[in-house]
Image (cartoon, grey):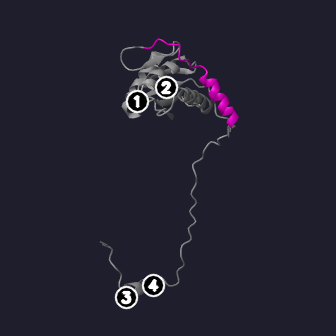
């Protein structure tokens, strides 16, 4: 049902009479786009090279020593255990997400390598890797691969809002980055 009151012919004529001698408004509002840092286009060959370089750290034979009780977690020896606690509590918000659902182990390794390379290139400190439940293959292998990589500082099972036990929050060591002087 239309609840809008219909104008009578008399009301329409009154409005037209009151509006004589006026001109329509010109829309002169300028909508500014948010200032974004210019993304430099990274050549495809470089991306493939970074992905291959970052994924060669992952071995299926190496078994790092991870905690067997409680949630999946790891902290590199030179990193404070407090970082692990902050990951567990959800103090870090992931800046990038990687979904491994439906990938083979080889594809998952390549994507992890690409994620770590992208984090380093874009100066992203925290990432979320969603491995899912499935047949528990990627759920078991993903922490083993991540623990081998020298740029992975720590990881912990994600808090519920970021995927719970089907995901990991990962801290990536990024280079010091200072904005250019303006």
The residue at which mark 4 appears reads as 16
Q: Which label's residue is closer to the chain start, 2 or 1?
A: 1
**Relative side of 23 to 16, left or right:** right
Q: Residue at x 34, y 79 (%)?
A: 6
The quarter of the picture where the C terminus appears is top right
Q: How many badges with numbers are in the image? A: 4
Q: Which label's residue is closer to the chain start, 3 or 4?
A: 3
Residue neighbourhood size for the residue with mark 3, other residues' Cα within 10 Å, grouped as few (<14), some (14–19), many (≥20): few
The residue at which mark 3 appears reads as 10
**Relative side of 142 to 12, left or right:** right
Q: What stretch is highlighted in magenta?
A: 44-66
Q: Does the magenta stretch include residue 111?
A: no
Q: What is the number of the mark on residue 134? A: 1
Q: Are marks 3 and 4 in contact (CB under 8 Å)?
A: no
The residue at which mark 2 appears reads as 170
Comparing marks 2 and 1, which lies closer to the viewer? 1
Relative to 56, is 104 above or below? below
Residue neighbourhood size for the residue with mark 1, other residues' Cα within 10 Å, grouped as few (<14), some (14–19), many (≥20): few
Residue 41 in the image: x percent, y percent? 68, 40
Q: Are marks 2 and 1 in contact (CB under 8 Å)?
A: no
């Amino acid at each position: 049902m239309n609840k809008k009151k219909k104008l009578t012919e008399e009301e329409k004529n009154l409005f037209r009479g009151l509006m004589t001698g006026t001109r329509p408004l010109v829309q002169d509002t300028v909508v500014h786009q948010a200032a974004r840092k210019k993304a430099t286009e990274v050549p495809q060959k470089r991306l493939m090279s970074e992905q291959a370089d970052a994924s060669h750290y992952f071995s299926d034979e190496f078994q790092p020593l991870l905690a067997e009780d409680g949630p999946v977690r790891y902290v590199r020896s030179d990193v404070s255990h407090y970082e692990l606690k902050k990951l567990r509590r959800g103090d870090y918000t992931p800046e990038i997400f990687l979904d491994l659902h439906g990938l083979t182990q080889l594809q998952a390794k390549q994507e992890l390598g690409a994620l770590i390379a992208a984090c380093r290139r874009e100066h992203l400190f925290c990432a979320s890797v969603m491995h899912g439940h499935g047949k528990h293959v990627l759920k078991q292998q993903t922490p083993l691969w991540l623990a081998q990589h020298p740029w992975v500082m720590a990881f912990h099972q994600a808090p519920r809002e970021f995927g719970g036990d089907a995901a990991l929050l990962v801290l990536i060591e990024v280079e010091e980055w200072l904005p250019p002087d303006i």
